[in-house]
Image: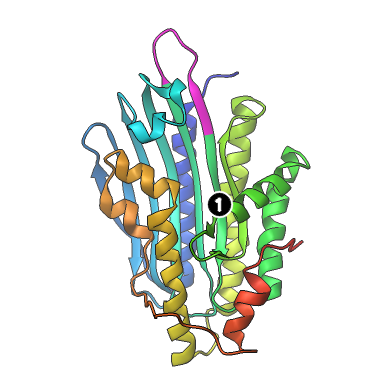
Amino acid sequence: MSEPDIQAVKSYLLDLQDRICDALAIEDGDRFREDSWDRPGGGGGRTRVLEEGVVIEKGGVNFSHVYGDGLPPSATASRPELAGRSFEAMGVSLVIHPRNPYVPTSHANVRLFVAQKPGAEPVWWFGGGYDLTPYYGFEEDAVHWHRTAKEACAPFGEDIHPRFKQWCDDYFYLKHRQEARGVGGLFFDDFNQGGFDNAFALMRAVGDSYLDAYLPIMQKRKDTDYGERERDFQLYRRGRYVEFNLVYDRGTLFGLQSGGRTESILMSLPALVRWRYDWRPEPDSAEEKLYTDFLPARDWV
């Protein structure tokens, strides 16, 4: 298996962060502020956040490159071959929480993990994906999102998109609620299929297609009229987003357990959120349609 080119991946990720921030800033009319930081123990990153924008209520696009001499026990318990190795982890992770309830929240992440020790082959893999969390569903938006994801995966084999889509449906599922977080997309981890060049190309295809998947939806929905009812439902559904990120999300858990920067790790949380006791949507309402027509996993393309 070919050796990982860590510098090439880092250069790509920094450029990806730039491109995504530039495109989203144009849509919003405001700029991301940058916060560069160092991690005690090795590495650091640059966090970019846009808050209280016209279109984006809170959005974060984070680059991190962290390294160290050893991994936390939570990481090596399921991967004993990583014990005693130094590690490097780098990636771009973003979450965009728009102000308008008709614009879905979106999440994307692409990352590389490498573990090494003298005299042994490095252990490495790529991971990532993106998923869409609408509050009010539109079938054409979900179809566009999934079609873009499928096209990004197509050059790497017919099995890739169905596998990554199913993985996403399974991963972004709140077991304690017995419901999906959104309409899914792509998710993959531990990917080194075909050697480094092939795996890196797939990661780039996923990262590069995020804006193609999301911007047309944002542009179409950002000026839709809404009222207090839609805003209230958006804040209620954001609670599901918080629950998933704090209970299940691998990146959040790894970051906190490995001594990562808390502000950057938790940038994914929305600015405003609301929980209600045992709330139920009205029958035959647009809110109920989200639960009946969009959250159950289906083949959108």
- Asked if residue 137 can be seen in this view, the reply is no
Name the residue at 78% across, 42% down.
Answer: 158
Position of residue 235 relative to residue 209, above or below, is below
Closer-to-camera residue (231/216): 231
Q: In the shown orientation, is residue 56 left or right of residue 44?
A: right
Closer-to-camera residue (200/133): 133
Q: Magenta includes 25?
A: no
- In the picture of the structure, the residue carrying the numbered disc 1 is 171
Residue 145: image x %, image y %?
A: 65, 62
Most frequent secondary structure within the magenta stretch: loop
Position of residue 226 relative to residue 87, above or below, is below
Residue 150: image x %, image y %?
A: 71, 52
Q: Magenta includes 122?
A: yes
Outermost residue toward the left in this view: 40
Q: In the shown orientation, is residue 44 left or right of residue 301?
A: left
Outermost residue toward the top in this view: 119
Name the residue at 44% across, 46% down.
Answer: 250
Question: In what element is the residue under mark 1?
Answer: helix
Residue type marked 1: Tyr
Looking at the rendering, the stretch of residues picked out in magenta corresponds to 116-125
